[in-house]
Image (cartoon, grey):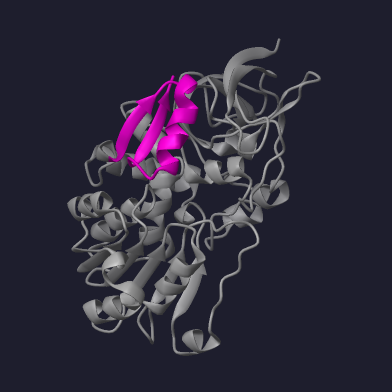
């Protein structure tokens, strides 16, 4: 029998989400039914909702990819999860394909095969799709077991839902993708939900200088609290922000990061990396169609440019350790969750994000 559940549905681009009931089919082969306990409001969902993300989605759609909850039922063929398990949603890791067997990245072949498509979660004539194959802006979801990570049961649902994307992307960008070294210098452009966790990752790695760059003074103060050694407001430096950062770091940073999705900031991040060996990692998602202008001379001079998805972290293989670190107090997520809202208030939560207020809003069920 279909499972009825409440969900926040996007019917039209840039129009308010509508809370309505959808029907989920029972879990099929390799699938799992999860009761959501928390779901994070991520900027990536906002980009899709507003119609300018390169990811895109079929409409109507239930968005949301940050989620944590409890397994209620498993379908045939599921051997790694059972009812009662606490799980986090994450990018797929089937642990079978060639990409999963490789040590060179975190893109399961199922991601590449299904990019830009979403399964239907409502089979009647009013068909509704599940964004990312998940749709965490709902009380329940049915998804493949490859998209779920079993974690310890004493971890708070609101905090581990943040590890579904934003927090792990930031921590992983520093620790897994860039591999920040002890004693190195780091610059982070953008101190939102991801950038602040890059700061924490750099601190965990033992960087000696960590510079947070943002126009929001409150976020600058939070960055310092979480481990930044310096905060720079670019408005105080006009067109010379890159020159100021190069001077501050004594020639450019060993590692730079862009965590906003703004082309100009990406260019500044690359220009602020040290000649000879500086590594610039792009984390932010730019609007669809925008192109990054890179001078070949920058690369010839030894600067390196790379991107990352989910911080290079693999869900089933690595995310449980991040949860352990959270519970050990190695990084702080509680201070970054500035609002907990019911599903009925999801539109208000995104209005707060549009205004640049708060750090992270979490829907609690």
The residue sitting at 77% across, 21% down in the picture is: 126
Is residue 309 within the magenta segment? no
Q: Which residues are magenta?
A: 336-365
Query: For the view shown, which residue lies furthest in the top direction?
Result: 1
The residue sitting at 36% across, 55% down in the picture is: 195
Is residue 150 visible in the rendered image? The answer is no
Is residue 356 within the magenta segment? yes
Is residue 55 rendered to the left or right of residue 83? Answer: right
Quarter of the picture containing the C terminus is top left
Is residue 339 visible in the rendered image? The answer is yes
Quarter of the picture containing the N terminus is top right
Q: Nearer the viewer, residue 85 or 22?
A: 22
The residue sitting at 40% across, 55% down in the picture is: 172
Q: What x and y, as percent, mark residue 19?
A: 57, 20
- In the displayed structure, would residue 6 be above or below residue 87? above
- In the displayed structure, would residue 285 be above or below residue 337? below
Q: What x and y, as percent, mark residue 223?
A: 24, 54
Q: Quadrant of residue 16?
A: top right
Q: Quadrant of residue 106?
A: bottom right
- In the displayed structure, would residue 55 be above or below residue 151? below
Is residue 239 rendered to the left or right of residue 17? Answer: left
Q: What x and y, as percent, mark residue 70?
A: 47, 22
Q: What x and y, as percent, mark residue 243?
A: 31, 81
The residue sitting at 72% across, 49% down in the picture is: 113
Q: Nearer the viewer, residue 217 or 106?
A: 217
């Amino acid at each position: 029998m279909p499972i009825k559940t409440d969900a926040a549905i996007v019917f039209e681009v840039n129009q308010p989400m509508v809370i309505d009931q959808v029907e989920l089919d029972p879990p099929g082969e390799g699938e799992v039914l999860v009761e959501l306990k928390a779901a994070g409001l991520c900027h990536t969902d906002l980009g899709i909702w507003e119609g300018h993300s390169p990811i895109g989605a079929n409409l109507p759609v239930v968005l949301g990819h940050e989620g944590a909850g409890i397994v209620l039922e498993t379908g045939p063929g599921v051997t790694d999860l059972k009812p009662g398990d606490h799980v986090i949603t994450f990018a797929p890791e089937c642990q079978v394909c060639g990409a999963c067997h490789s040590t060179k990245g975190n893109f399961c072949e199922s991601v590449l095969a299904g990019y830009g498509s979403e399964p239907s979660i409502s089979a009647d004539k009013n068909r509704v799709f599940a964004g990312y194959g998940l749709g965490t802006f709902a009380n329940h979801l049915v998804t493949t077991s490859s998209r779920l990570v079993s974690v310890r049961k004493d971890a708070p649902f609101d905090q581990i839902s943040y590890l579904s994307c934003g927090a792990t992307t930031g921590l992983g960008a520093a620790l897994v993708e860039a591999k920040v070294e002890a004693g190195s210098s780091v610059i982070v452009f953008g101190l939102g939900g991801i950038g602040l966790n890059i700061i924490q990752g750099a601190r965990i790695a033992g960087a000696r200088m960590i510079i947070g760059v943002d126009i929001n003074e409150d976020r600058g103060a939070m960055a310092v609290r979480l481990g930044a050694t310096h905060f720079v407001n670019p408005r105080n430096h006009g067109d010379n922000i890159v020159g100021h950062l190069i001077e501050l770091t004594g020639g450019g940073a060993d590692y730079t990061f862009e965590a906003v999705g703004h082309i100009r900031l990406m260019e500044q991040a690359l220009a602020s990396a040290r000649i000879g060996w500086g590594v610039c990692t792009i984390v932010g998602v730019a609007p669809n169609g925008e192109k990054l202008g890179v001078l070949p001379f920058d690369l010839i001079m030894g600067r390196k440019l790379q991107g990352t998805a989910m911080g290079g972290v693999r869900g089933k293989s690595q995310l449980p350790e991040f949860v352990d670190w959270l519970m050990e107090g190695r990084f702080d997520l509680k201070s970054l969750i500035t609002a907990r809202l019911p599903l009925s208030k999801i539109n208000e939560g995104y209005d707060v994000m549009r205004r640049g207020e708060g750090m992270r809003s979490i829907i609690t069920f």
